[in-house]
Image (spheres, rainbow, N blue to C red):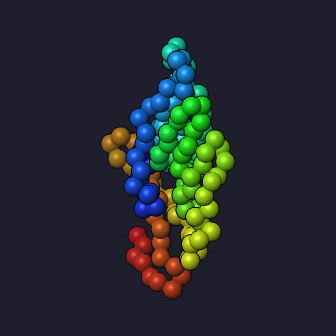
Amino acid sequence: MVGGDCHVGALPEKPVWLNEHTLLFSSTVRGSCGLFRVTLDGEVTPHDHDAQTVIPSFTARSGGVALIRERADRFPEVELNGQQVTNLHERLTFPARPPERVTFQNDLGEGEGWVLLPGARRKCPRS
């Protein structure tokens, strides 16, 4: 799971059977989290994945998929079968700022994260 300050308290749904042969599950890919399908023969394909978004929660029932989608520059929104059904981002009373990507090395390889820096009127330490 990709962590963030804007999550609305949701956790990924357990994998859900779309039909008797296909399982829907969430998985991270670097800094994104999307939905993927796996068939009984082990073939994994993207169901709904965008490298710029995180899907922190979803559910699937009766052939439909409801999910929460968020991006670094937008407040999380609810979607149903690919159609956005909320417009919470437009209600924000402050401008959204994109985070800066940071990377670091450790024994396991490269790690990554994002930081939201304060606005131009505030100072913050830089290394």
Q: Position of residue 97 (x, y in %)?
A: 56, 69
Q: Is residue 101 left or right of residue 86?
A: left
Q: Nearer the viewer, residue 117 or 74?
A: 74
Q: Nearer the viewer, residue 25 or 116?
A: 25
Q: Nearer the viewer, residue 66 or 23?
A: 66
Residue most extreme to the front: 62
Q: Quarter holding the N terminus?
A: top left
Residue most extreme to the left: 107
- Position of 56 relative to 100 (above/below): above
Q: Position of residue 98 (x, y in %)?
A: 56, 65
Residue 57 visible in the picture: yes
Q: Quadrant of residue 95?
A: bottom right
Q: Position of residue 50 (x, y in %)?
A: 61, 44
Q: Is residue 121 left or right of residue 63?
A: left
Residue most extreme to the bottom: 121
Q: Quarter holding the C terminus?
A: bottom left
Residue 29 visible in the picture: no
Please give the name of the residue rendered at 62% of the width and 68% of the height, measured from the top-left corner.
90
- Position of 46 relative to 93 (above/below): above
Please give the name of the residue rendered at 50% of the width and 39% of the height, measured from the top-left corner.
59
Please give the name of the residue rendered at 40% of the width and 46% of the height, measured from the top-left corner.
11
